[in-house]
Image: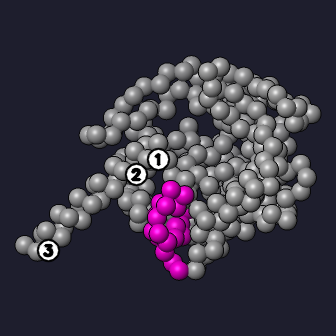
Amino acid sequence: MFLLLILIATFSFRAITDKIYMKTTYSGYDRQSAELMKLINSVIGIPYCQKPQYRNDSTDITRLSKKEWFAAASYARIPRNRVIISEAPGITHYRETEDMSEIDLVEDPKNLVKSMPSINEAEHAQSLELSPIFYYARLINPIYRQLCGYFLTCSSLNIAVKDYVLQNPKLLADIVKIAERPCDYIRTIDEIKPGDEIVYYSNYESRGKVFRPLKLDQESLKLSIKRARERLDCDNKNGYTLPSTYHPSINIRKLVLLMINNNGVVNIDTKDRLNIIIERKDIK
């Protein structure tokens, strides 16, 4: 009877904390996996995705030109058609039927860069990006569920990748290389050079989705480095940590799950082409 009560209490605690996590993280947006996603997007050189806290000039990574990147995968707008669906009782989210890369306006109001991309170029670049896998994937994908079935004890960083990388073995090899040692690709504040502090970002406004450059100040640069190292457990010597908004898992995530498919997202309609599980070599 006592063991039964403990079991019931455990499941109740998990169910309650799961709901809290889903409600406080935009339906399970995983900031730790998102950190690795941004790092890889930046270091492999996807146009307009570079972030100053990462080593974008690493000599061990193959550098593609913008023309080569745009040739790697075709891009065509998909009409917006956001559909609300429910994968399980009490959990509602959006099916990825709309083109999340669609941009309404490109602007540089502070004249931070010499020239801006066209709307089509900015959209094409964003369509090439890797994506973090949302926590609701545990309900529909057995591999994700095995590695990250509960956010507090999740053991993997989880990334969705479009299958264009399968046509470029060197690019896929670079993604795997970075995933093995992500902490090695985070800069120190002294390694950030003048000009590196310019980043591109998009934001939803009353005018629609706006794409523009932004210049980060010194404090923002220091904070971005700190957050990157925290989320990826670069300085964690204990093997565990207290959960927080920036680091929801108690565990150090020693594995990386790459789920490669046609559209680079994971939902009920996803048919995986290839799943790769990588053991990190930059942490013990």
Q: SS of the residue at dot 1?
A: loop
Q: Is residue 255 magenta?
A: yes
Sequence order check, earlier mark of 3 and 1: 3
Q: Say if residue 223 shows up in the picture.
A: yes
Q: Quadrant of residue 212?
A: top right
Label 1 Cα neighbours within 10 Å, binned few <14 / some 14-19 / many ≥20: some
For the N terminus, the quadrant is: bottom left
Using the numbered discs, state the Cα–Cα distance from disc 1 to disc 2 in whole angstroms: 6 Å
Magenta stretch, main secondary structure, is loop
The residue under label 3 is which amino acid type? Leu
- Foreground residue among 70 and 166: 70
Q: Which residues are magenta?
A: 238-258
Q: Position of residue 122 (x, y in %)?
A: 74, 31
Sequence order check, earlier mark of 2 and 3: 3
Q: What colouring method underlies this structural image?
A: one colour
Q: Kindly identify which residue carries mark 1.
A: 25
The residue under label 1 is which amino acid type? Thr
Task: Give above or below for 278 relative to 236.
Answer: above
Q: Kindly identify which residue carries mark 2.
A: 21
Q: SS of the residue at dot 3?
A: helix
Label 3 Cα neighbours within 10 Å, binned few <14 / some 14-19 / many ≥20: few
Q: Is residue 62 magenta?
A: no
Residue at the image position 39 percent from the left and 39 percent from the top: 268
Q: Kindly identify which residue carries mark 3.
A: 3
Q: Quadrant of residue 101?
A: top right
Would residue 87 appear left or right of 243 to someone viewing this image? left
